[in-house]
C-alpha cells in the first residue's frame, strides 16, 4: 500500500529535519520541492533560472510549474510506495492539484502533520540554520550543532547558509507563508486529515509525535 504524507508548517518549522528522520521509519522517499528547485538552480536549467527569480525574493514559484515538477517526480519508481511531501502543497491550488494527481493513481493523502511554530521562533531557526551541500542535512548553531563546525556529521560534506535565510528574505518567506500557505491548515482540518504537532518541543519529541500521527492514519486506512 502506498502512503502519501504532507508535512505542513512555516519556513523553518522543521519539515526537512523531520522528513529526513522519518524516511527510514516509513520506507517512503522525501519529496522536497525546495530541494528540487535548488537542484535545478545548481544545474542551471530553465526551471532553475525561473525559480531563482522567486526564491531570491522569498516568493512562491508559480503553481503551474511547481505542480508539473511534482508530477514528474511522482513518475519515478521510488514514489510507487508513496512520498513524504516537504514544502508541497503551499497553496490551495497546489493542494487541489495534488488531489487530482493522487486520484489518478487511486491514492489520497493519508495525513497532514502540521508542525506548529510561532513566527519569532521560525525567524530564530532560519537565522541559525546550516545545511549540507551534499546531502541537505540540517543543523542549527544552538539547537542542533554539527560535531565539527562546518562539516556534516552524516556525509562529511561542507555546511553552508542558504541565501534566502538572510533576515529580510526570511521575514518575507514567513509573511508569504501566512498569506498563501496558512489557509491550508483549515482546508485540511475540514477534510479530517490534519494532525497538529507542537513544533517547539525538542526534535526527538516532534519525531515521536509525527510517527504516531502517521501510524494512526495508516492503521485507520487499513481498517
Ligand atoms: P523550502 O526549501 O521548502 O523552504 P521552507 O518551506 O521555507 O522550509 P525550510 O526548508 O526553510 O524549513 P524547514 O521547515 O524544512 O525547517 P528545517 O528542518 O530546515 O523552499 C524554499 C523556496 O523554494 C520557497 O521560498 C519558494 O520560493 C520555493 N518553493 C519551495 N516549494 C514551493 C512550492 N510548493 N510552491 C512554490 N514555491 C516553492 O529546520 C530549520 C532549522 O531549525 C534547522 O536549523 C534545524 O536544525 C532547526 N530545528 C528543526 N526542528 C527543530 C526543533 N524541534 N527544535 C529546535 N530546532 C529545530
Image (spheres, helix red, strand yellow):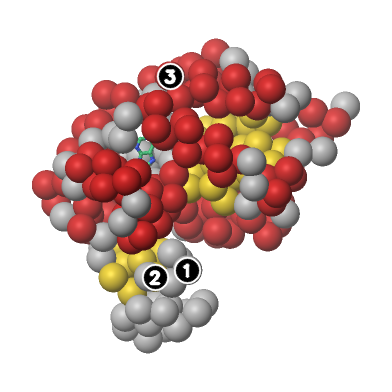
Q: Which residue is mark 3?
A: 93
Name the foreground residue: 35 vs 167. 35
Q: Which residue is mark 2?
A: 132
Disc 1 crowd rating (10 Å Cα; few below 14, some 14-19, many 20+) is some
Q: How many marks?
A: 3
Horizontal arrangement in the rendering, residue 169 relative to residue 220 (left or right): left
- Residue 22 occupies which quadrant of the picture? bottom right
Q: Which residue is mark 1?
A: 135
Please indicate, yes or no, whether residue 166 appears anywhere in the rendered image: yes
- Residue 99 occupies which quadrant of the picture? top right
**Residue at point 28%, 70% (across, down):** 160
Residue 9 spot, x, y in % from top left: 42, 38
Name the foreground residue: 80 vs 172. 80
Residue 52, compared with residue 191, is above or below; it is below
Residue 193 spot, x, y in % from top left: 61, 24
Residue 66 spot, x, y in % from top left: 41, 34
Q: Label 2 to label 1, Cα distance in Å?
A: 6 Å
Secondary-structure class at tag 2: strand
Amino acid at each position: 500500500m502506498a502512503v502519501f504524507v504532507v508535512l505542513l508548517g512555516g519556513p523553518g518549522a522543521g519539515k526537512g529535519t523531520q522528513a529526513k528522520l522519518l524516511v527510514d521509519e516509513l520506507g517512503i522517499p522525501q519529496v522536497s520541492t525546495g530541494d528540487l528547485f535548488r537542484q535545478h538552480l545548481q544545474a542551471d536549467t530553465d526551471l532553475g533560472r525561473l525559480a531563482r527569480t522567486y526564491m531570491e525574493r522569498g516568493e512562491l514559484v508559480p503553481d503551474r510549474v511547481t505542480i508539473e515538477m511534482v508530477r514528474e517526480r511522482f513518475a519515478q519508481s521510488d514514489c510507487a510506495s508513496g512520498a513524504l511531501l516537504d514544502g508541497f502543497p503551499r497553496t490551495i491550488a497546489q493542494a487541489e492539484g495534488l488531489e487530482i494527481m493522487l486520484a489518478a493513481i487511486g491514492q489520497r493523502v493519508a495525513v497532514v502533520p502540521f508542525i506548529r511554530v510561532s513566527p519569532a521562533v521560525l525567524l530564530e531557526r532560519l537565522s541559525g540554520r546550516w545545511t549540507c551541500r551534499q546531502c541537505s542535512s540540517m543543523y542549527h548553531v544552538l539547537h542542533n550543532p554539527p560535531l565539527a563546525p562546518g562539516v556534516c556529521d552524516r556525509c562529511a560534506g561542507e555546511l553552508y547558509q542558504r541565501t534566502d535565510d538572510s533576515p529580510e528574505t526570511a521575514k518575507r518567506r514567513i509573511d508569504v507563508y501566512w498569506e498563501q500557505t496558512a489557509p491550508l491548515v483549515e482546508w485540511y482540518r475540514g477534510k479530517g486529515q490534519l494532525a497538529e504537532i507542537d513544533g517547539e518541543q525538542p526534535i526527538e519529541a516532534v519525531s515521536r509525535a509525527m510517527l504516531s500521527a502517521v501510524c494512526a492514519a495508516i492503521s485507520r486506512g487499513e481498517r
